[in-house]
Amino acid sequence: MLVKTEYDIQFQLAQPTAIVAMLHLHPSLESRVRSGNELLIEQVDGAVKTTVPSQIYLDSFGNRCTRFMAPEGRIQLTGASTVALLDEADPINAYAQQAPVQELPSEVLQFLLPSRYCEVDEFTSIAQDLFGWMTPGWTRASAIRDWVHEKVAFNYKTARPTKTAMDVFSERIGVCRDFQHLAITMSRCQNIPARYVTGYLGDIRSPYSGAGDFSAWYEVFLDGRWMTMDARHNNPRYGRVLMATGRDAADVAITTSFGNADLMHFYVESREVLEDGTIVPPLEAPVFATESPVPSI
């Protein structure tokens, strides 16, 4: 299947500001990119646009990052890509096994430790009471995912940059990243390596759910490889497009400005397309029959 992604993000800057953007697709998708995957950075002054120079580097997690010095005024970040993905939903690996900690690859061990938004040390007894009795591996990992999905309500208005896994556990409400932080933390407490993922997840072969946005999910390390989990959308989905991975959201911010940057415009979309570029619309929401009203006499 082909998935087209695009974005248009604009900031107003009161003074020149250093910015790091993480808007390219993940390097692991390079061979699947059919077109695009370039970041255009421009200063906008009325009808005049001037390209802002930038540098690309890989961070310690292997994510592709772009750094630049943004001039004062309005800055526009735009890009689009078309990527070929496997025509299948998230796999269910029901028999995936969990390795003992001593047998895990060294580079995976960091995904068992506490991080900025995932207070593993504060959840040990909680996670043990809830999941310690379960069969290790996919059974336990998916149970953690489903528990978070059932216990936490989604609400955009509750988003805040300081919200940690413990906050989500206490408040039982949050946005995509909050669902994932809590599930990641519970997983690590059960010695399941878990890492945070950011990317695109449009309404591909699903009912339309509203304006597009970047999405968050997570991955667990079972059977010697990373496997997709999503505590917000816990049913298998099509068309996930990977952008970056890290310990939690602090490692994979879409943009990081070293100074004040006021967001003025935000557009993100991810859709399935045909070979000729025709957009495949999302599914229509199901219509449920209701009882006919009793006529009044």
Image (spheres, grey):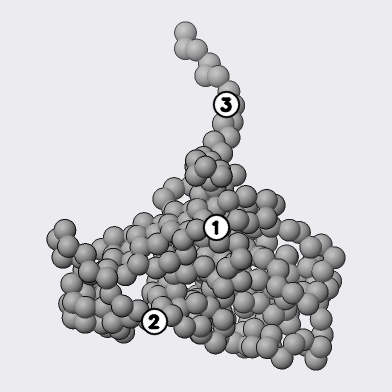
Mark 3 and mark 1: span between their CA atoms? 46 Å
Image quadrant where residue 42 sits: bottom left
Category of crowding for the residue at label 1, using alpha-carbon neighbours closer than 10 angstroms: few (below 14), some (14–19), many (at least 20):
some
Give the residue pinned by disc 1: 34
Tag 2's secondary structure?
A: strand
Tag 3's secondary structure?
A: loop
Checking the image for residue 55, the label placed there is 2
Whichever of labels 1 and 2 marks the residue nearer the N terminus, that label is: 1
Give the residue pinned by disc 3: 290
Point out the frontmost of discs 3 and 1: 1
Whichever of labels 2 and 3 marks the residue nearer the N terminus, that label is: 2
Is residue 239 found left or right of 37 in the rendered image?
right
Residue 291 picture location, percent across and down: 58, 23
Query: Which residue is pictured at 50% across the width and 77% down the height?
Result: 64
Residue 108 picture location, percent across and down: 69, 85
Point out the frontmost of discs 2 and 3: 2
Whichever of labels 3 and 1 marks the residue nearer the N terminus, that label is: 1
Q: Amino acid at mark 3?
A: Thr
Category of crowding for the residue at label 3, using alpha-carbon neighbours closer than 10 angstroms: few (below 14), some (14–19), many (at least 20):
few
Q: Amino acid at mark 2?
A: Gln
Is residue 9 found left or right of 293 in the rendered image?
left
Mark 2 and mark 3: span between their CA atoms? 58 Å
Residue 27 picture location, percent across and down: 57, 73
